[in-house]
Image (spheres, grey):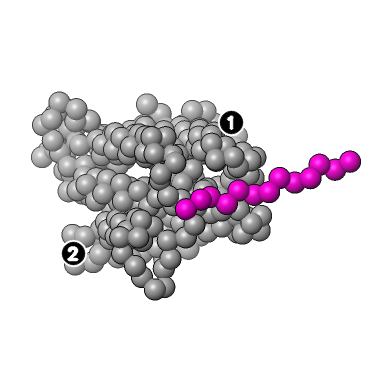
Amino acid sequence: MDPIIFRIPGTNFALHWYGLMMAGGIILAGYIAEWGVRRYGEKSEYVWDLMIWAVPGGVIGARLWYVLTDILGGSTFFLDNPVRILKTWEGGLHFYGAILGGVLAGLIYIRKNKLDIRLFLDAAAPTLLIAQAVVRPANFINQELYGQPTNLPWGISIDAAHRIAPWTNMLRYPVETTRFHPAFAYEILWNLLAAGILMWLALEFKKRIKPGSIFAGWLVLEGVGREIIEFFRPDQPRIPGTDISITRIAAGVMIIAGIIALLIQYEIIHLPFLKPGSDFYKIAPKKAKKK
């Protein structure tokens, strides 16, 4: 399947399946987050205004994270020609960078409007997983995010042009018979399962669950899922001299941070420099209508 849906003749403009699915994932995430904040009495229009800040910040963060991990992994691809950093249409975005950039940009809007960041983080947590799952089929179309060779019945074929070492030897790994782990599909299944767990918790324990807990749960589930999936991601940059990917380290930090946040929030542990915060979301006051 061609990764490009159509191209305008005589120009470099092309619509890719990846871009279309990303746009669809962002829009779907917005509607789910809108529902999430509205359940607690917050105005849903804040979500869409927030996304004006978060989406561009997420794209910039996703690119910078990808470039940074590529360099830390020992590659000189971007160092040899820094202009390549701007060529996002050639591929190279990372989900973790998107989250970090989106949160930092969104924080500016939240502080400006004096909103409760915990409410918006909790509303966003399951949507991040769902949006990620919506985008992942594009990786199948692009023939990327696959794992090691496998004999399992759901293994997928990868053509010669998209092979990475050491599976570029077509005599040893013939296209006709070699199949690979669909790592993107494993991530889709995990994301949907994790999103379901978080949404169930939010609905079932609405009156008992503490602000910030859903996002903390996302940190744990996203981190655990990525730790598992990294076993099927040989394309990820490794720390030079080791078999540990930079993403795996980030996922481990997320798990630890999420667990500590939950322990503090439910006052299982007490740290003098970190407080559990209010047990209720702060809802923005309604603006008086102009006469």
Tag 2 residue: 242
Tag 1 residue: 9
Is residue 166 located in the magenta-colored stretch of the structure?
no
Is residue 288 located in the magenta-colored stretch of the structure?
yes
- Helix, strand, or loop for circle 1? loop
Check disc 1: other Cα within 10 Å, few if <14, some if 14-19, many if 20+.
Answer: few
| Magenta highlight: main SS | loop
- Magenta region, residue range: 279-291
| Residue farthest to the right, as pictured | 291
Q: Amino acid at mark 2?
A: Thr
Q: Nearer the viewer, residue 150 or 268?
A: 268
Q: Position of residue 66 (x, y in %)?
A: 40, 56
Q: CA distance from mark 2 to mark 1?
A: 46 Å
Check disc 2: other Cα within 10 Å, few if <14, some if 14-19, many if 20+.
Answer: few
Whether residue 87 is visible: no
Is 91 on the left-hand or right-hand side of 194? right
Q: Amino acid at mark 1?
A: Pro
Q: Residue at x 38, y 34 (%)?
A: 204
Label 2 close to label 1 by CB (< 8 Å): no
Q: Residue at x 60, y 53 (%)?
A: 115
Reply above or below: 287 against 275: above
Q: Nearer the viewer, residue 79 or 36?
A: 36
Reply above or below: 262 against 45: below
| Residue farthest to the bottom, as pictured | 272
Q: Position of residue 14 (x, y in %)?
A: 53, 35
